[in-house]
């Protein structure tokens, strides 16, 4: 259960072991004795009325019934789809079906069909579509291992690894002889800054906190595991060359959580060869993709605030090195995922004006053609807005079969497959699910020369004759974007609509979806221009809709948590706030977080070279102006937005006499994994707004 701050004393936190089902790796650690305020019992007095509590419980039950598939992969020959089905909190299994759908659905497993408490996931098709590689711990493995199974069931699945460490992102070589994957030898935690950090203890150095992620390779027919990349490079993403002899990858010196923002593009001819840096970029880079003829490498480069949430422009460069060429310069959108479908044709997805678009580009002429656009969230696996595509023929997207997970506020998540824009629904996990929230409408406005877009969710059972409160939900990033998506159990603001609130999801300057100039527009200006854009969006909504200006609140997580903290020190327009994993003081944050390299592109210098630009955007420096009742929540092992930032803000608001509560969740990182915690944080936020900004004024 979470710890709720009550008074001040010394405590010692017990040793704990966190098991993350979503990544299937055990993380055990002893938390050191630290000086913190005392923590009260979790069953504190509820803020909400009994009627509100009943409605909140109903919302949580509905969100908990949603079945979320986590991966969808089309076979290279375009005839079958594999997907990973989650079994609630119990585990996950792999299913196969032809494009006809669930009528021919069957289970593929290294265990037994009746097992429900093990995990099988991370699927990858062999180039000939006859085999499927996947991870499984269903044979009583101490951790997930790599298996290969014949799709026709003619042979039992074969175990290829007995590794100790974290395995993910499987990729067959184009010739079908080898399987490569990202591997953290002897990992004690899931790779990535979103996961809970190891507790700091003993003599601290960057090296003893680092766990290095490398590319490992196994022969698909069996044999020893070979670690291909050197121990002095942390690899984030990789791609096989078309002749199966070399790798291209994005990597940086350890520690990996911190240095993605200064990563370079490497090629490596073989496991025994030395890596060659072919690009030291001035921006963040992601998704290196070798062209089918082996002559070029495409990638996405831009101002990105988080690894894995890709956005920027598309670049091409010679595979032997050279100057990259931006082939989407000035495009009023944000490409997020790419793949080659011909020697001179790229398929890509992009954020555009709060929507998702699929397009193809002729790389020789630079001309692009939109293939599909929709107000929904799409993805097939690890990368945002990704597609799984069949083996290309003749560079024409019209010949491709694709698989993806689709969802929106009106469309619950399921697997779809088929031609682009002509998909057929493969699974019907959520056929009985219906939205328990109001209608969503796209809202656009201009401010200071920038055009912003946002999504406005209407209250459930909206009556234009009534006045309603409004909650502004600011996304994280800041380089990200809100596109319509079915809500999950965890901290998301869609649930407020079910209680009778308008909810505004703005995409202000700094967001994806309007081009790279727009994404870069909040550099050295956090909390100012983007807050003015958000307030202009609030004005746009309140001018035409029955919104009570005395019942406007704000919330957000990560950068959205910072914006929540900062906003209430800049304006009195917000009457309640919930700040999740926020940042209250950029100067102290620089020395506390595990990912400080992301700040240089945004602030222009380190805090030691230009402290003034960090102080300018620090909420703590304006705390005497804050009067908004605020709930502050955070994980105690958050490396991206460390808990001391939330403690500092809570302490300052308490000193100012502003109503405030701080809730700290044990063994949680930046992204919560414990299902009880995910429910609890949403329930507390719903209750907080119901108390200080009730849906129906008393």
Image (cartoon, rainbow, N blue to C red):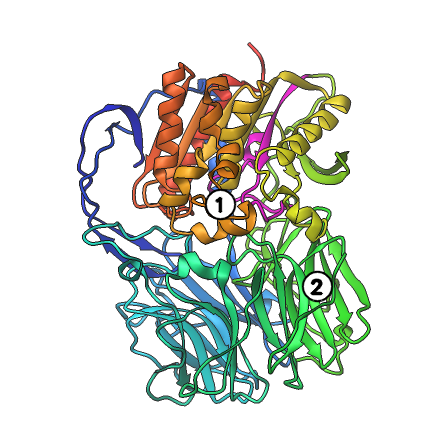
Q: Is residue 687 visible?
A: no
Picture mark count? 2
Q: CA distance from mark 2 to mark 1?
A: 25 Å
Task: Looking at the image, tell me whether mark 2 or mark 1 is earlier in sequence order.
Answer: 1
Under tag 2, what secondary structure?
loop
Under tag 1, what secondary structure?
loop
The residue that appears at 67% across and 68% down in the rendered structure is 315
The part of the image, by quadrant, that contains residue 394 is: bottom right
Q: Is residue 130 rendered to the left or right of residue 677?
A: right
* Mark carried by residue 96: none
Classify mark 1: residues with Cα within 10 Å, few (<14), some (14-19) or many (20+): some
Q: Which quarter of the figure is the C terminus placed in?
A: top right
Q: Are marks 2 and 1 in contact (CB under 8 Å)?
A: no
Q: How far from the left and from the top, in percent, is residue 660?
A: 40, 21
* Magenta-tinted stretch: 467-496
Q: How far from the left and from the top, in percent, is residue 20?
A: 35, 55
Q: How far from the left and from the top, in percent, is residue 17?
A: 24, 52
- Residue at image mark 2: 423
- Residue at image mark 1: 65
């Amino acid at each position: 259960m979470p710890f709720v701050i009550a008074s001040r004393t010394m405590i010692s936190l017990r040793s704990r072991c966190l098991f993350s089902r979503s990544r299937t790796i055990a993380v055990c650690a002893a938390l050191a004795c630290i000086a913190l305020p005392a923590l009260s019992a979790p069953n504190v007095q509820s803020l909400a009325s009994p009627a509100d509590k009943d409605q909140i419980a109903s919302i949580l039950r509905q969100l908990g019934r949603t079945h979320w598939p986590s991966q969808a992969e089309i076979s290279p020959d375009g005839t079958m789809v594999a997907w990973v089905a989650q079994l609630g909190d119990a585990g996950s299994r792999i299913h196969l079906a032809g494009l006809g759908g669930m009528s021919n659905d069957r289970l593929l497993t290294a265990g037994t069909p009746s097992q429900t408490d093990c995990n099988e996931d991370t699927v990858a098709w062999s180039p000939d579509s006859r085999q499927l590689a996947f991870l499984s711990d269903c044979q009583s493995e101490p951790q997930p291992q790599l298996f290969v199974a014949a799709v026709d069931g003619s042979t039992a699945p074969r175990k290829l690894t007995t590794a100790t460490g974290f395995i993910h992102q499987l990729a067959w070589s184009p010739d079908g002889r080898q399987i490569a994957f990202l591997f953290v030898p002897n990992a004690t935690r899931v790779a990535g800054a979103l996961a809970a950090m190891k507790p700091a203890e003993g003599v601290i150095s960057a090296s003893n906190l680092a766990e290095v992620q490398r590319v490992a390779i196994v022969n698909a027919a069996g044999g020893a595991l070979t670690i291909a990349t050197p121990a002095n490079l942390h690899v984030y993403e990789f791609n096989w060359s078309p002749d199966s002899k070399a790798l291209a990858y994005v990597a940086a010196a350890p520690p990996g959580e911190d240095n993605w923002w200064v990563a370079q593009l490497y090629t490596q001819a073989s496991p025994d060869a030395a890596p060659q840096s072919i690009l030291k970029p001035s921006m963040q880079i992601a998704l290196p993709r070798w062209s089918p003829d082996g002559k070029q490498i495409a990638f996405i480069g831009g101002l990105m605030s988080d690894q894995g949430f890709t956005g920027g422009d598309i670049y091409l460069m010679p595979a032997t090195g050279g100057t990259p060429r931006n082939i989407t310069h000035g495009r009023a959108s944000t490409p997020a995922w790419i793949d080659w479908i011909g020697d001179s044709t790229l398929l890509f997805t992009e954020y555009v004006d709060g929507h998702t678009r699929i397009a193809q580009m002729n790389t020789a002429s630079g001309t692009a053609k939109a293939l599909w656009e929709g107000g929904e969230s799409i993805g097939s696996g690890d990368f945002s807005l990704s597609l799984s595509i069949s083996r290309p023929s003749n560079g024409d997207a019209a010949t491709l079969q694709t698989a993806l997970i689709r969802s929106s506020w009106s469309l619950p998540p399921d697997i779809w497959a088929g031609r682009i824009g002509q998909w057929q629904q493969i699974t019907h996990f959520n056929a009985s699910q219906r939205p328990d929230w109001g209608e969503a409408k796209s809202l656009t406005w201009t401010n200071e020369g920038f055009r912003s877009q946002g999504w406005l969710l209407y209250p459930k059972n909206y009556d234009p004759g009534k006045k309603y409160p409004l909650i502004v939900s600011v996304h994280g990033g800041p380089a990200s974007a809100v596109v319509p998506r079915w809500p999950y159990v965890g901290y998301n603001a869609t649930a407020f609509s079910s209680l009778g609130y308008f909810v505004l999801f703005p995409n202000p300057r700094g967001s994806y979806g309007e081009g790279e100039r727009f994404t870069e527009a909040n550099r050295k200006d956090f909390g100012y221009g983007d807050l003015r854009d958000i307030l202009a969006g609030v004005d746009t909504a309140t001018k035409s809709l029955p919104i009570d200006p005395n019942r406007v609140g704000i919330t957000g997580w990560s950068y959205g948590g910072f914006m929540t903290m900062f906003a209430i020190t800049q304006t009195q327009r917000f009457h309640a706030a919930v700040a999740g994993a926020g940042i209250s003081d950029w100067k102290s944050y620089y020395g506390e977080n595990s990912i400080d390299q992301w700040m240089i592109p945004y602030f222009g210098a380190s805090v030691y070279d230009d402290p003034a630009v960090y102080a300018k955007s620090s909420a703590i420096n304006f705390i005497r102006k804050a009067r908004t009742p605020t709930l502050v929540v955070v994980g105690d092992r958050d490396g991206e937005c460390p808990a001391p930032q939330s403690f500092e803000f809570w302490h300052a608001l308490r000193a100012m006499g502003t109503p405030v509560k701080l809730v700290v969740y044990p063994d949680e990182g930046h992204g919560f994994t414990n299902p009880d915690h995910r429910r609890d944080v949403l329930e507390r936020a719903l209750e907080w707004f119901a108390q200080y900004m009730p849906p129906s004024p008393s």
